[in-house]
């Protein structure tokens, strides 16, 4: 990500989140999500092996790590989209082990996906309305009697329009979601997640494939979630963004948590630099990494 | 000389025939499965067979009244949908396709086998179950209608019941598809993981959809056998494909599509077969025998389906943007 996308205004960071020394698996003052001994193997590969981790409430936590570190798998395990081999984890004091994904969502833990899952052939407004919880009209037998759900539907629509306006998607409300740009779909997915008033929002690479013009607006929306009292946990590769908005950073490598701390101290951590960022983390890899250039040349040769 | 009046009046009769109504109902059920939910059900013929046999066996072997026979058929198709759905709806869509196509064939072969001859009549099928339905007919006996649409009281009674059912179920489908339930269903068609992440029990919704569309198919099977006998050979996989043809012709995610599609399908089929048969008779097609002429209409149906899918994949009523094929 180029540096012109780096926002200029300084967001207010939340501090004093942890108890004792900051380190892998350190205790938090008020954890919203606690995981213990969560492991997941695919054949011989251990994708996730997390001994203990706590996500602080009311803060923005970034989960970073190199490709294949198990971040997305960990996400899937926490949200019920994948089943771990072992482990216990709880959200807001309630156990999430063996709870199916839809129940996890109903508890107030809403996730988004790395590859955006906007429902293409539904209108933007329908996408939003789908996000609302506890709809009477979603019962097959009650759905044939519109007078039972009409009032609730109007309330949901008003709420959807209000959130859409905030995300500047209100002019698109009658368009199919498939007609939105990649960045707009990311916004829509985030907006849709808000329809259920979640307590914890988990964003899987919210910035992937978003053009710099939209980055700032997305960042502001994530900060906005925190100011509304929600907890945010996100996976991201863009270090500018992590440094800018995260209050707490958890670093994963090869399935384990290798470091934790506030963004600045984590990025000085030698273990993190070695394991993940490499020596060139502050320079533009595109121009200095000769390895990439050679791979590209080979690819071009292959095509010809 | 070709008797054009006979060809056209035969074709026109198909417009309101009970068979057309039955196919419209089955296609409407398939629209719920495939068009709205994205479930690839290739076993609609099986649901229809359950309706036909459930109704006929209840009356012939157990002496049930009409309403109880209808309930038996519906109950059987609910059980069938559960058996199909419980193992496969958690898996990817294509597994349901494989399981449904196999299950419908298993059903047909069970109905065909001699082992249950006392109950199912094996390959020769069942008849003589129509009295109960005919007794409910409020129309005094006689012949009514005009032009090609002249039928006796029983034939009118089947048509009225069949098309009333089509209208009622089309209205119900329209109501549920514009409700929040329909929104969840269409969301599942687009991306079930996204819907799951929003707190909806996707598995349960897919099961509801499978059962609902299957019950439509079962009612279609009952209407289908009222003007004819129950014969197992009618419930081959090709029946499912004709219903898919109707669905694609009309538009997969539409309400009117399956109904109008069924009318167009049967009128055209009747017109083609009438025309080809008489053209062979008149010596216009010297390279063809009467038997070959009887098969030609299905070749023409195949060509027509290909043309539709290539040039108008959304069907007649479909919105090109809202279509399961276009992703």
Image: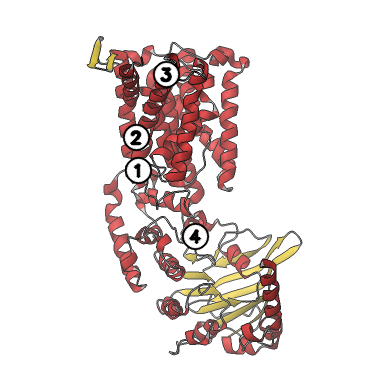
Please state the horizontal and vertical placement of residue A5, each as a whole percent of the image: 48, 84
Give the Cα separation between the discs numbered 1 and 2. 9 Å
Q: Residues within 10 Å of mark 1 (few under 14, many from 20)?
A: some
Which numbered disc, 3 or 2, marks the residue that appears first in the sequence?
A: 2
Horizontal arrangement in the rendering, residue B281 relative to residue A24 (left or right):
left
Q: Secondary structure at mark 4?
A: helix
Q: Secondary structure at mark 3?
A: helix
- The disc label shown at residue B317, or none: 1
Give the Cα separation between the discs numbered 1 and 4. 32 Å
- The disc label shown at residue B197, or none: 4
Residue under label 2: B260
Mark 3 or 4: the one toward you: 3
Q: Residues within 10 Å of mark 3 (few under 14, many from 20)?
A: some
Which numbered disc, 3 or 4, marks the residue that appears first in the sequence?
A: 4
Q: Nearer the viewer, residue A204 or A134?
A: A204
Mark 3 or 2: the one toward you: 3
């Amino acid at each position: 990500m180029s540096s012109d996308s780096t926002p200029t205004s300084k967001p207010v960071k939340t501090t004093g989140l942890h108890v004792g020394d900051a380190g892998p698996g350190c205790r938090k003052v008020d954890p919203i999500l606690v995981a213990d001994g969560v492991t997941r193997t695919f054949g011989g590969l251990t994708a996730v092996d997390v001994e203990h981790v706590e996500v602080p409430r009311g803060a923005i936590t970034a989960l970073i790590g190199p490709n294949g570190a198990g971040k997305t798998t960990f996400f899937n395990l926490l949200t019920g989209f994948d089943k771990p081999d072992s482990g216990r984890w709880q959200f807001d004091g309630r156990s999430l082990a063996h709870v199916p994904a839809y129940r996890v969502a109903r508890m107030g833990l809403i996730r988004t996906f790395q590859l955006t899952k906007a429902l293409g052939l539904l209108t933007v407004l329908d996408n939003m309305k789908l996000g609302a919880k506890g709809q009477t009209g979603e019962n097959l037998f009650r759905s044939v009697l519109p007078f039972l759900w009409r009032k609730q539907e109007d309330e949901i629509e008003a709420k959807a329009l209000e959130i859409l306006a905030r995300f500047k998607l209100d002019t698109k409300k009658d368009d199919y979601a498939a007609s939105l740009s990649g960045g707009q779909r990311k916004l829509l997915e985030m907006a849709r997640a808000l329809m259920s008033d979640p307590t914890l929002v988990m964003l899987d690479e919210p910035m992937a494939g978003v053009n710099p013009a939209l980055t700032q607006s997305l960042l502001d929306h994530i900060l906005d979630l925190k100011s509304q009292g929600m907890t945010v946990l996100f996976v991201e590769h863009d270090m500018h963004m992590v440094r800018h908005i995260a209050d707490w950073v958890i670093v994963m490598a090869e399935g384990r948590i290798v470091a934790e701390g506030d963004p600045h101290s984590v990025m000085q951590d030698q273990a993190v630099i070695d394991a993940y960022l490499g020596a060139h983390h502050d320079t533009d890899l595109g121009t200095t990494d000769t390895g990439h250039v050679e791979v590209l040349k080979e690819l071009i040769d292959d095509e010809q | 000389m070709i008797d054009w009046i006979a060809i056209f009046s035969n074709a026109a009769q198909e417009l309101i025939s009970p068979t057309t109504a039955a196919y419209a109902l089955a296609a409407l059920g398939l629209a719920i499965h495939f068009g709205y939910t994205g479930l690839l059900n290739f076993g609609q013929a099986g649901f229809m067979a359950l309706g036909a046999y459930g109704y006929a066996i209840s009356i012939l072997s157990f002496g049930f009244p009409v309403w109880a026979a209808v309930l038996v058929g519906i109950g059987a198709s609910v059980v069938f949908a559960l058996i199909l759905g419980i193992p496969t709806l958690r898996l990817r869509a294509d597994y349901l396709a494989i399981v449904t196509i196999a299950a419908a064939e298993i059903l047909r072969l069970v109905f065909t086998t001699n082992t249950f001859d006392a109950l199912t009549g094996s390959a020769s099928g069942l008849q003589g179950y129509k009295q109960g339905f005919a007794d409910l007919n409020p129309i005094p006996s006689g012949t009514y209608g005009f032009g090609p649409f002249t039928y006796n009281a029983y034939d009118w009674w089947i048509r009225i019941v069949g098309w009333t059912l089509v209208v009622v179920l089309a209205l119900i489908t329209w109501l549920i598809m514009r409700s929040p339930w329909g929104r969840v269903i269409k969301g599942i068609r687009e991306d079930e993981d996204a819907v799951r992440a929003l707190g909806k029990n996707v598995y349960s919704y897919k099961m509801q959809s499978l059962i609902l569309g299957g019950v439509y198919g079962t009612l279609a099977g009952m209407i289908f056998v009222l003007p004819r006998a129950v014969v197992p050979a009618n419930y081959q996989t090709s029946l499912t494909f004709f219903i898919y043809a109707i669905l694609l012709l009309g538009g997969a995610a539409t309400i009117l599509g399956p109904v109008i599609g069924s009318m167009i399908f049967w009128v055209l089929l009747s017109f083609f077969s009438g025309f080809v048969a008489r053209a062979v008779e008149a010596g216009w097609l010297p390279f063809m025998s009467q038997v070959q002429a009887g098969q030609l209409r299905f070749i023409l149906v195949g060509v027509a389906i290909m043309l539709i899918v290539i040039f108008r994949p959304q069907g007649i009523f479909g919105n090109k943007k809202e279509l399961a094929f276009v992703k």
